[in-house]
Amino acid sequence: MVTAETAVLAPFGVAFAVLLLWMVSLGLTQVQLVDAAREGARLVARGETPATAESITRRQSPPGATVQVSSHDGLVTVEVSARSRLPLPFFSHVGARTLRASAVSADESP
């Protein structure tokens, strides 16, 4: 009887573990995007060129991220987006989502 119960409940346990792993993966990717966007906005606001800030932001972002830097009315905006994937070899496309983060900073350069 225990074997039958285990055989019925084991797939649910595995599915729950994959769901938890996916949620943690989404959270970590979002944190990386927010940190990268914040750093990029800070760099441009302090006088770095947008190309340099974009390069540094791309290095701090997850692989395959896109970065957009813009300035308008004394504000610098950096937007970063990346596709989050499940960190399992055969299920990397399951639950893939595009996550975005942006940061705005006042332009401090003279």
Image: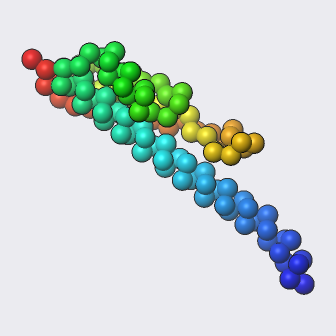
Quadrant of the rendered image containing residue 69: top left
Locate the N terminus by quadrant. Answer: bottom right
Residue 104 falls left or right of residue 61? left
> Looking at the picture, how far across and down is residue 98, in whole percent?
54, 35
Locate the C terminus by quadrant. Answer: top left
> Looking at the picture, how far across and down is residue 80, in whole percent?
42, 30
Q: Check the image and report above or below for 10 versus 43.
A: below
| Residue drawn at x 79%, y 68% as measured from the top left | 10
Quadrant of the rendered image containing residue 70: top left
Residue 34 falls left or right of residue 66? left
Quadrant of the rendered image containing residue 36: top left
| Residue drawn at x 66%, y 61% as measured from the top left | 17
Residue found at the very far bottom of the displayed protein: 1
- Display coloring: rainbow
Q: How many marks?
A: 0
Q: Nearer the viewer, residue 32 or 103?
A: 32
Residue 107 falls left or right of residue 84? left
| Residue drawn at x 48%, y 47% as measured from the top left | 28
> Looking at the picture, how far across and down is residue 11, in whole percent?
79, 64
> Looking at the picture, how far across and down is residue 60, in whole percent?
41, 33
Residue found at the very far left of the displayed protein: 110
Residue 8 falls left or right of residue 62? right
Q: Let me know if residue 88 appears in the view.
A: yes
Q: Check the image and report above or below for 51 versus 18.
A: above
Q: Let me know if residue 101 appears in the view.
A: no
| Residue drawn at x 24%, y 23% as measured from the top left | 44
Q: Check the image and report above or below for 50 versus 37.
A: above
